[in-house]
Image (tube, grey):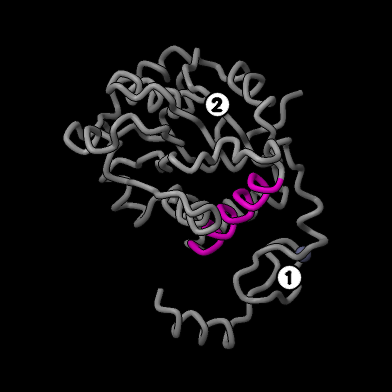
């Protein structure tokens, strides 16, 4: 949206906290009190192997970090729903910025942890048909927010989706069927891959549950010759 249009909309419809309705400054989506209800997950690189081993599939990602727990009815769920189902795209940019801010503050002092300056952010792609149905890919907005805070490049041309897997049918499948369903769903633009010259990649998505989709992306990128493929997600369901 043009900045002028967005400024006019902010005056006409001032942003309100998505959880409690409090009036906020432009560009914010949760007030400080509601944000404290979110359950942040530690972002130091030492957490990575626990995240990877909690996935339902064997995953060859070199690193995985997740911002918050995804609690039913919780404030992070409200933000993700607003972004995906109410088309509040700027809430996605805000979530990406919030996560990047935490990563830059909390990761190993002196190092940038997962947000290594050479790395490229990759949104987990939606199939073209699904993208037309929804009108956008929410992971693009998350990448835009992470990029604006960290200065990392983001790229939506390298990894593409070939098959149309509906999330509705995927939820009815068991784990093996779901993995088969997504195994051949992605491909890499080979010519573009050559220009990226083996740089570290960071796959970005809003929510990682079983990990079947994002692990299929990791497999595809490793098969195309990338050796350092990382996962960064806004949220994951609580593990009990
Ligand atoms: Zn609030």
Q: Specify whether tag 1 is near ligand 1 (CB below 8 Å).
A: yes
Residue 224 location, quadrant: top left
Magenta residue span:
89-105
The residue to which callout 1 is attached is 21
**Image-based side of 46 in relation to 4, left or right:** right
Residue 129 in view, yes or no: yes
**Image-based side of 65 in relation to 84, left or right:** right
x, y (%) of residue 179?
A: 41, 17
Classify mark 1: residues with Cα within 10 Å, few (<14), some (14-19) or many (20+).
Answer: few
Q: Secondary structure at mark 2?
A: strand
> Which of these two is toward me, 19 or 65?
65
Q: Secondary structure at mark 1?
A: loop
Image marks 1 and 2: residues in contact by CB distance under 8 Å:
no
Classify mark 2: residues with Cα within 10 Å, few (<14), some (14-19) or many (20+).
Answer: many
User: Which residue lies at the image location 79% right of the left edge and 63% below the top edge?
Assistant: 32
The residue to which callout 2 is attached is 63
Instruction: First in sequence, mark 1 or 2: give its number.
Output: 1
> Which of these two is toward me, 107 or 213?
107
x, y (%) of residue 221?
A: 34, 26
């Amino acid at each position: 949206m043009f900045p002028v249009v967005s400024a006019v909309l902010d005056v006409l419809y001032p942003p309100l906290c998505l959880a409690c309705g409090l009036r906020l400054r432009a560009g914010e989506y949760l007030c400080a009190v509601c944000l404290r209800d979110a359950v942040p997950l530690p972002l130091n690189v030492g957490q990575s192997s626990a995240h990877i081993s909690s996935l339902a599939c064997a995953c060859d990602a070199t690193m995985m970090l997740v911002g918050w727990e995804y609690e039913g009815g919780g404030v992070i769920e409200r933000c993700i729903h607003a972004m995906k189902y109410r088309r509040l795209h700027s809430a996605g940019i805000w979530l990406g910025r919030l996560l990047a801010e935490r990563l830059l503050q909390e990761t190993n002092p002196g190092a940038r942890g997962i947000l290594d300056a050479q790395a490229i952010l990759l949104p987990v792609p939606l199939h073209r048909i699904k993208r037309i149905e929804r009108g956008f890919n929410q992971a693009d907005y998350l990448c835009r927010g992470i990029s604006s805070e960290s200065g990392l490049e983001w790229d939506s041309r390298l990894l593409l989706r070939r098959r149309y897997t509906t999330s509705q049918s995927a939820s009815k499948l068991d784990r093996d069927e779901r993995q088969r369903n997504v195994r051949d769903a992605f491909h890499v633009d080979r010519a573009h891959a050559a220009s990226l010259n083996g740089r570290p990649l960071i796959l970005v998505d809003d929510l990682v549950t079983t990990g079947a989709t994002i692990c299929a992306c990791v497999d595809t990128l490793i098969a195309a010759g990338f050796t350092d493929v990382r996962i960064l997600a806004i949220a994951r369901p609580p593990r009990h």
